[in-house]
Amino acid sequence: IDMGDASNDIGNLTFDLAGHELYFITNTDILGDLTATNGDIDVSSLTVNVAGNAEFTNDDLKISTGILDVEGTFNSPNNTTFSDAGRLQLSGTVTDLGTMTNSVGTVEYDGGAQDIFQDTYFNLEIDGSGIKTLPTGNITVNGDLSLTEGSLNYNTGSSSKFITLKGSVLGTGTITASTTSIFSISGNGTNQDIRGISSDDIGIRLANSANA
């Protein structure tokens, strides 16, 4: 889809063409919702801003080096595929990330108060003013955990839950807990920076070839 230039915005965009792909070739602002009932959505290396909700019902969301920035709710129950260092920036409720690439790419939670979806991430970034709450289950970050702004909290409804980190903790935000929780550092021998842990309820555990 070619919008010509940044001044040509879309209201709502719906794609319903099974076996086909909607491929963006210009940066695009969608003022309403982005809905793919059937067919893949490929952001590629562009920036696509969605002011409303994003729903990818039956097929795939693809991001190369581009950015998909969604202000409303996000649901991608099939596949969320990164092929390079792209970004998925989420400000609202995340219902599903589907089968998500966890060897490249960044997912950023940048709204107010948000719940982190339980999954395995590559890079995970916490941003925005609100508290971000971890799921009741465990999560894994295969790359870096960036605490750009705000606080990342362990869920009070669970205890002895893990964040397993294979990279470093970056940024100036904090990680807090009010129940017994575990921050597991599982590296490959590369130097890892750990910061921001601000609760005595969080135990730090080194695993495999961690070098923190």
Image: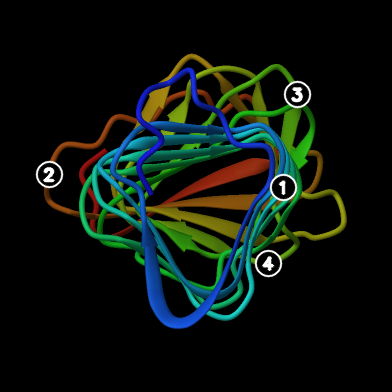
Residue most toward the left? 189
Dot 1 corresponds to which residue? 53
The CA span between labels 3 and 4 is: 21 Å
Seen at 27% across and 38% down, the residue is 212
Q: CA distance from mark 4 to mark 2?
A: 27 Å
Distance Cα–Cα, label 4 vs label 1: 26 Å
Q: Which mark is residue 96?
A: none
Secondary structure beneath disc 3?
loop
Percent x, y of residue 134: 69, 49
Which of discs 1 and 2 lies nearer the camera? The answer is 1
Of callouts 1 and 2, the N-terminal one: 1
Residue 64, position as x, y percentages in the image: 25, 51
Q: How far separated are the C-alphas under marks 1 and 2?
A: 39 Å
Q: Earlier in the sequence, mark 4 or mark 2?
A: 4
User: Are the residues tagged 1 and 3 within 8 Å (C-beta)?
Assistant: no
Q: Amino acid at mark 4?
A: Gly
- Of labels 4 and 2, the one closer to you: 4
Describe residue 41's horizontal placement relative to residue 75 as left or right: left
Front tag of 1 and 3: 1
Q: CA distance from mark 3 to mark 2?
A: 32 Å
**Mark 3 touches mark 4? (CB < 8 Å):** no
Question: Residue tagged by mark 3?
Answer: 130
Mark in the foreground, 4 or 1: 1
Q: Which residue is mark 4?
A: 137
Q: Amino acid at mark 2?
A: Thr
- As drawn, the label of residue 190 is 2
Q: Would you identify the image quadrant in which residue 175 lies?
A: top right
